[in-house]
Image: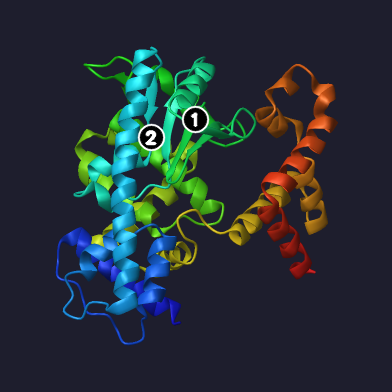
Amino acid sequence: MNRETVSDYLLKLIRSTVRNEMPMEKPEGVSWKDLFNLAKKHQVEELAFHSIVKLNNKPEGEDYALWKSGHERNEVIDILQREEAKLIIDETTKRNIGILPLKGIILKAAYPNPLFREMGDLDFLIEPGKVEDMDEVMKSLSYEPEDVGLEDSHDVYNKEPYLVVENHRRLLPPTEENHWYTDDIWNRLISDENNPCLKTMTATDYYLYHLLHFEKHYSMGGSGIRSIVDQYYILKSFKDQIDWDFVEDTLPKMNYVEFEKMATDLAYALFEDGEMTEELEMSKNFIMNSGTYGTFEEYRKFEIERYRKELGIKTKKGYFFRRMFMERERMEFIYPSLKKHGWLLPFFWVHRLFKSIFTNRGKVKQELKGFKEDK
């Protein structure tokens, strides 16, 4: 497989959909299966399929069945997710729980066709102090707790076969460099005129949060091309509502001036007539080689570099030891009771280790394999 050719053609198909133009026919060196797998990895199947159905030489047989079945599955998931989001919001309203829809739920409205914006899960920010009440809501709607009360800044619930919900307690954990910007976000939210429990961000906050979320994935192993499509539609839909003076003042504080410029310039280079510079070409290739949520290998490289700069850890053994026995500040966020009972830290190290072995065995094996290959 010529990955560059496949990536380039996928981008051309997405561009044709975004610009509502006739797509270029598939080059001979590109296979429909490779193209489908790459589109699926980046969660842009629908953007590509919308152009593929316009081609004179459409995929046939098993190749077409692959694209068609993916399209039909995405149609079902899109309907289920949007209906489930309404159901969750209705139920939280009945119980007087404030809720803020996040990420894809909002972005779907910015796309010309909501089906174009695929979502892996539903994300909400929950009113402070209402986490336990929200847990009751999820269970009343037949969701199974998958990871609740322990990990990071959100609780995960699952309803087979397609629905996953992440209820966020905060937008960024205190270990993130720019958590200061989102720590008081709840106080800046706008209440819906017809439903005080349903919250929205200002366009300015939404744009900056999008950049925070995008950059986090990008720097920790890559964020797929879907994030650049998001960047394009956010600018297209919300540009006149964003306070650009505030953005210009805030980006340097976040150390995001260059990142925001890259994201914007690349969006316009790919989907408008902006210039594709050598630096943008490098960013594009990095993004296309990662996928929607990045790769574990790229994330590991990012973490090793972070530990080297921040803690002076230069060896992979030192990095692995730090990963197993994280500093108390990070452990406190995973296990809040540590704030009052610091003596429990060694026990929580052991708990986290065994929890990872039994619930994330594949990821642990992958990490150990990576260290063996590096020797």
The answer to whether residue 39 is left or right of residue 270 is right
Q: What residue is rendered at 56% in x and 52% in y?
A: 220
Q: Mark 1 highlights which residue?
A: 168
Position above or below: 83 against 291: above
- Residue 316 horizontal/vertical position (percent): 78, 58
How crowded pointer 2 is (Cα within 10 Å; few <14, some 14-19, many 20+) is rated as many
Q: Mark 2 highlights which residue?
A: 102
Question: Mark 1 and 2 residues: CB-CB less than 8 Å, in contact?
Answer: yes
- Residue 230 horizontal/vertical position (percent): 32, 49
Q: What residue type is labelled 1?
A: His
Residue, far bottom: 28
Position above or below: 289 against 127: below
Secondary element under disc 2, as helix, strand or loop, is loop
Q: Can residue 211 be seen in this view?
A: yes
Q: Is residue 189 visible?
A: no
Q: What residue is rendered at 38% in x and 52% in y?
A: 227
State the colouring used for the structure image.
rainbow
Question: 175 or 336: nearer the eye?
Answer: 336
